[in-house]
Image: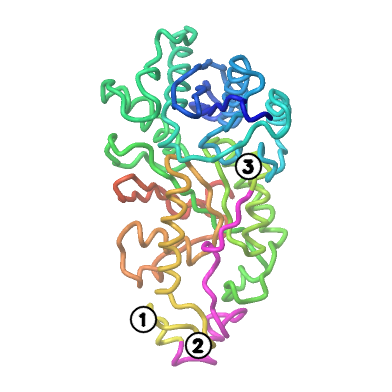
Amino acid sequence: MTGSAREFVVEADGGSRGNPGPAGYGAVVLDAATGETLAEAAEYLGVVTNNVAEYRGLLAGLRAARELDPDAAVHVRMDSKLVVEQMSGRWKIKHPDMKPLAAEAARVFPPGRVTYEWIPRANNKHADRLANEAMDAGARGEQWSPSTSTADLDSGDAVDVPAARVTAETSGEADVRAAKAVASPGWGPPDMGAPATFVLLRHGETPLTPQKRFSGSGGSDPSLSPVGREQAEKVAESLARRGTIEAVVASPLARTRETAGIVAARLGLEVTVEEGLRETDFGAWEGLTFGEVRDRYPADLDAWLASPDAEPTGGGESFAATGARIAVTRDRLVTAYAGRTVLLVSHVTPIKTFLRLALGAPPESLFRMELSAASLSAVAYYADGGASVRLFNETSHLR
């Protein structure tokens, strides 16, 4: 790469209204120095998945950049963590539909000529709009053309189009996808934009689960039992049919990573490990039943049941500390997955805490929720900081 080579920025996106469903992509090539729009591309793809549409958008953007200057250096910006991490070589590409697309994208420019950056969805408006226009055109039986595009009116900031159109093309479609993963669409105002939707999956059974033993982050870290692995397979099949999960994030403990791995393999996704999703540390109570704790540590148990600040015997983690940890983790993940539907594979206390915080319920509400192994719950988080609980302890997929 010479010092005189041109530098382009490629922004690309893809979407599927149903995943798989009617899909399209959008891509734009910008001059890296001036931000000027140099080329646009969009296409209706028929029925494919979100991830395939995103890869097709990347490929179209790279090809458009090569037509402008085959010797250019290209910086790709996308809101698809999956595509960015896979094309950067940090994640393996396992899904058979994406392998050839990724290989083709890697051949457009010589190795080392293209770099990748993940950006929030809100910063990828130009490509997102093109993708939606392509899908809209496909729904009308037409092909997208630059003459019908509104993307040339801006390069990512506000555009002067009717508010109803913006709602229908961005928040509306994403909110419908989120609602399909849960029980009901909720009551979020349409001008909030697409929410970050957390589908909360408790891990499958371990040998300790049927015995109702305390099993936190400070214990033996058990793996799934045969029943737990079967439960994970069932929830994986259910989520694959719904087709709304765009990313999988798991607690670092063995039972959650194993559950997440089974689900992610079925969905063609990678698992990201998030330390903040780990279970509460129950100290000396790890591995004991409630009755055994009552017999051995009656005063400590009474204090724990009476106050969220009380710690389990032996320096465990209080519910107040767990709540603070989950709040920080929630905020970080809401920012990282704005406008997307992500599966969080976690444990009883963290999932109940997500729900408690969303509802504004007191700490003692944790004792009034039942959360089954391999159950699904869901919370949507809007741009104004509001939250909507959409599902709780769903287990129909296990029957």
Residue 247 x/y as whole percent: 56, 44
Residue placed under numbered mark 1 in the picture: 307
Query: Residue at coordinates 47% horizontally, 45% vertically from top-left?
Result: 337
Query: Residue at coordinates 63% horizontally, 76% vertically from top-left?
Result: 219
Query: Residue at coordinates 37% horizontally, 17% vertically from top-left?
Result: 150
Based on the picture, tell me whether residue 283 belongs to the magenta stretch.
Answer: yes
In the image, which is nearer the foreground, mark 3 or mark 2?
3
Q: Is residue 201 toward the left or the right of residue 366 in the image?
A: right
N-terminal of the two: label 3 or label 2? Answer: 3
- Circles 3 and 1, Cβ within 8 Å, touching? The answer is no
The region drawn magenta spans 271-300
Q: Nearer the viewer, residue 170 or 302?
A: 170
Q: Quadrant of the N terminus?
A: top right
Q: Residues within 10 Å of mark 3 (few under 14, many from 20)?
A: some
Instruction: Calculate the distance from the C-alpha at mark 2 to the C-alpha at mark 1.
Output: 16 Å
**Secondary structure of the residue carrying numbered label 1:** loop
Residue 242 x/y as whole percent: 54, 36
**Amino acid at dot 3:** Glu
Q: Residues within 10 Å of mark 1 (few under 14, many from 20)?
A: some
N-terminal of the two: label 3 or label 1? Answer: 3
Based on the picture, tell me whether residue 285 belongs to the magenta stretch.
Answer: yes
- Circles 2 and 1, Cβ within 8 Å, touching? The answer is no
Which label was assigned to residue 85? 3
**Secondary structure of the residue carrying numbered label 2:** helix
Q: Residues within 10 Å of mark 2 (few under 14, many from 20)?
A: some
Residue placed under numbered mark 2 in the picture: 294
**Secondary structure of the residue carrying numbered label 3:** helix
